[in-house]
Amino acid sequence: QQQVKQSPQSLIVQKGGISIINCAYENTAFDYFPWYQQFPGKGPALLIAIRPDVSEKKEGRFTISFNKSAKQFSLHIMDSQPGDSATYFCAASTETSGSRLTFGEGTQLTVNP
Amino acid sequence: ETGVTQTPRHLVMGMTNKKSLKCEQHLGHNAMYWYKQSAKKPLELMFVYNFKEQTENNSVPSRFSPECPNSSHLFLHLHTLQPEDSALYLCASSRGLAGKYEQFFGPGTRLTVL
């Protein structure tokens, strides 16, 4: 019930391509869906987040698409750059769960020059 | 120093050692967290503190003992660890407890238990 399933585990994309990472959840009470980006030797950092009252949120080259009925959300990175190479985690939480963020397993993205 | 800092960055210890991890946040936040990050697994929330009070212990073995003397500092005391405890231990902080508050992570302590 509390799991967030993330795929793929790893992704290799050419520079300029589109990177797509998918997540699925079971708990319909989740109402906050952030994506975190983690570079080697660093802690995760919030990249972009969405709430279920909208189906899409865009910030620069990064877009979250949200499908409430399917209980899925995805991260799209347009015009992927080598500097985007990192591990990406989706997460979900509810206001009532307070601090608990449930994380996906992570996707290691490599963008080749 | 800005953000969330953690020391040491790397730690190697034997199973009979006692060591401590330190976390300090310079963001004026009220909530602090310990997470365990293992390869190819989701981040595991271990402990949560809010205004120095522990609000969550996610069934963590007693060989891990947290301490939060004030809202800016968080420690994780380690004793008689097992090799499977080897992982990256991340500290995080947030302004408050709720999904809407962004969690800011430190760089982590890479722990190896021999």
Image (cartoon, helix red, strand yellow):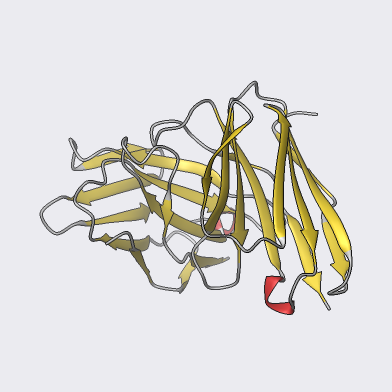
Seen in the picture, residue B110 relative to A96 is either above or below; the reply is below
Closer to us: A39 or B35 = B35
Residue A57 locus on image (x, y percent): 29, 39
For the C terminus of chain A, which image quadrant?
Answer: bottom right
Residue at image coords 45%, 31%:
B101
Residue lying furthest front in this view?
B62
Whether residue B8 is situated above or below residue A10 in the rendered picture: above
Q: Residue at x 35, y 45 (%)?
A: A93
Residue at 35% x, 41% y: name it.
A97
- Would residue A14 be found to the left or right of residue A55 on screen? right
Q: Residue A99: percent from the left, percent from the top?
A: 45, 40
Camera sees residue A78: no
The reply, left or right, for residue A24 in relation to residue B108 is left
Tell me if residue B33 comes above or below residue A72 in the rendering: above
Q: Is residue A89 above or below residue B38?
A: above
Front residue of B65/A82: it is B65
Position of A90 compared to A52: left or right?
A: right
Q: Give the image location of residue B111, x and y in percent.
A: 77, 65
To which quarter of the image does residue B14 belong? bottom right
Q: Quadrant of the N terminus of chain A?
A: bottom left
Q: Position of residue B53 (x, y in %)?
A: 59, 32
Image quadrant where residue B29 sits = top right
Residue drawn where x is 21% and y is 40% of the image: A52
In-image side of A52 versus A64 (left or right): left
Asked whether B90 or A83 is in front, the reply is: B90
The residue positioned farthest toward the top in the image shown:
B28
Q: Nearer the viewer, residue A30 or B80?
A: B80
Figure disc tally: 0
